[in-house]
Amino acid sequence: MNFRFCGNSGLQLPLISLGLWHNFGDTDSFSVAKDMIIHAFEQGITHFDLANNYGMPPGSAESNFGKVLKTYLKNHRDEMIVSSKAGHLMWDGPYGDGGSRKYLTASIDQSLKRTGLDYFDIFYSHRYSPETPLEETVQTLIDIVKQGKALYAGLSKYPAGKAYEACEIMKAQNVRCLIYQDKYNLLHRQPEREHFSLFREQGLGFIAFSPLAQGLLTNRYINGIPDGSRAAKPHGFLQKEDIKPDLTEKIKQLNRLAEQRGQSLAQMSLAWLLAKKEVSSVIVGASSVQQLQNNILSINNLIFSSEELNQIELVFR
């Protein structure tokens, strides 16, 4: 694994990070989840990305990660970066969602208990909450760092203007925002237009989630929607109606370009992200050790010629 400094900080992140959003809850196989976490660490993936609401039921991904850490990796805590977040609905009532001091404080205490950790390396505000004064949310992140419950603070899915304000509030109290997290992939380019200048100005690291667009940027949907795939399920972010003929044609073109590079479409899609200097790391999900290993192999070819980059851009014109 190769590592990259996270923005202007001294913290290095692996190019590939493992996200535990799907396939690590109590409704999933603990044995498979354990094998993926251990394999990731053995391959140099030192960063594990969690949130309070990950898993089914919510919270179970943190609990299962804690079990794996305690049972199999307990001597390696100081070789890991473990992040968690709060901001989305976690429990019923007015205090289980949003960006209030009450919710963020209760959430990190619960998350630390579930994982069995003394602190998180990074703790994020998981989303911008317009119902909460920004100062309240950011002050809570500052206090979490000063209390030692997290080493660094991060932001996720904030409008660029609000993220800038949050960074300035933190700097005024000598707690720099370390990192920004958002969806970014070949099919979703919004961060380029709205946030890249912020990263450069504030010295933020940037970590991309959904780098394969919920599986669209793989060869899984090139010839239709297979049974058991995410799009075949009645719930979730990816639905059958999202996979339109024009999108399928673009994916086929990208797949041909990937084959010319000697990569799978998934590997090329990850490499395309990591070729950008603004990207500190990408968060991959996985349902098996084999799938995870295939994604890791993307780091073997991160160089794109100008012609290849132009061909990729032409797919979307």
Image (cartoon, grey):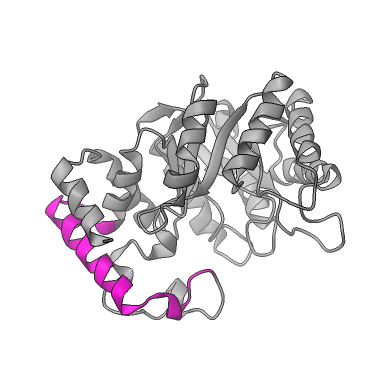
Residue lying at 73% horizontally and 47% vertically, measured from the top left: 114
Give the x, y percent position of residue 55. 63, 60
Q: Nearer the viewer, residue 293 or 92?
A: 92
Give the x, y percent position of residue 11. 51, 24
Which segment did they paint magenta? 237-265
Q: Is residue 145 left or right of residue 215?
A: right
On screen, residue 229 above or below 142: below
Q: Nearer the viewer, residue 198 or 245?
A: 198
On screen, residue 18 above or below 147: below
Give the x, y percent position of residue 231. 45, 75
- Residue 98 highlighted magenta (yes or no): no
On screen, residue 208 above or below 61: above
Give the x, y percent position of residue 83. 61, 39
Q: Is residue 46 visible?
A: no
Specify the quadrant of the image occupied by residue 276.
top left
Specify the quadrant of the image occupied by residue 22.
bottom right
Q: Is residue 260 left or right of residue 171?
A: left
